[in-house]
Image: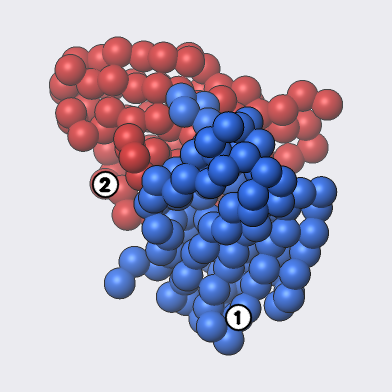
Chain colours: A red, B blue
Amino acid sequence: ETGVTQSPTHLIKTRGQQVTLRCSSQSGHNTVSWYQQALGQGPQFIFQYYREEENGRGNFPPRFSGLQFPNYSSELNVNALELDDSALYLCASSLGQGATHSPLHFGNGTRLTVT
Amino acid sequence: QKEVEQNSGPLSVPEGAIASLNCTYSDRGSQSFFWYRQYSGKSPELIMFIYSNGDKEDGRFTAQLNKASQYVSLLIRDSQPSDSATYLCAVKGGAQKLVFGQGTRLTINP
């Protein structure tokens, strides 16, 4: 059974640029969630995708957008990058639409640095 | 008031002792509670989850939940240097998202 995989591992971008982060969910998991973790903070919920549709969103501006594909893999896109977007971006997969008791299993994350 | 609160630490515990990590939450409708361990530069790793009031034990780890007091704790028995990490408390209600605390940094001293 393969776990959640994310790419790339590290990324350096310039303010104003756009970035796409990718995530492959754990085998059998149909729901993908994205989180942003700034240094010294807990992860913050960005949004969740279930069956290719956004299924809940946190307090992030519209320049944060996403996609989920038929194989349940997902992308996070961030436009007009700002310095404060520098963070560890975590993808987590789970089974079921917002299933309350379904634990999240995180990928290794993508470390984004915006200069 | 933050939705999930943890003491940021650092919490220093001698090797072999019991480490006690605490977490409070504000949403009384919360239904699921999770503890994650995060080593520096790594992603969070699920340690335990608990749904019902009381204690849940798994090896050296015990999670405790008191919904009336809106309080969750994690006990680590026989602490080892490899337990040194940041421990994240996360809470889930009826909505889709997990709400995390800021984490408690735990150091086990040999």
Q: Residue B60 at x, y = what percent?
A: 76, 49
User: On the rendered structure, is B52 left or right of A24?
Assistant: right
A55 vs A82: above or below: below
- Which residue matches tag 1? B67
Q: Relative to the observer, which residue lies in front, B74 or B47? A: B74
- Which residue matches tag 2? A61
The verdict on a common chain for dots 2 and 1 is: no
Q: Where the C terminus of chain B falls, by quadrant?
A: top right
Residue drawn at (43%, 75%) of the image: B26
Element marked by disc 2: loop
- Front position among marks 2 and 1: 1
The amino acid type of the residue labelled 2 equals Pro
The amino acid type of the residue labelled 1 equals Lys
Q: Residue B59 at x, y = what percent?
A: 81, 49
The answer to which image quadrant residue B91 occupies is bottom right
User: On the rendered structure, is A65 left or right of A1?
Assistant: left
The answer to which image quadrant residue A89 occupies is top left
Q: Where the N terminus of chain B falls, by quadrant?
A: bottom left
Residue drawn at (53%, 31%) of the image: B39
Q: Relative to the observer, which residue lies in front, B86 or A112? A: B86
Q: Residue A5 at x, y = what percent?
A: 62, 23
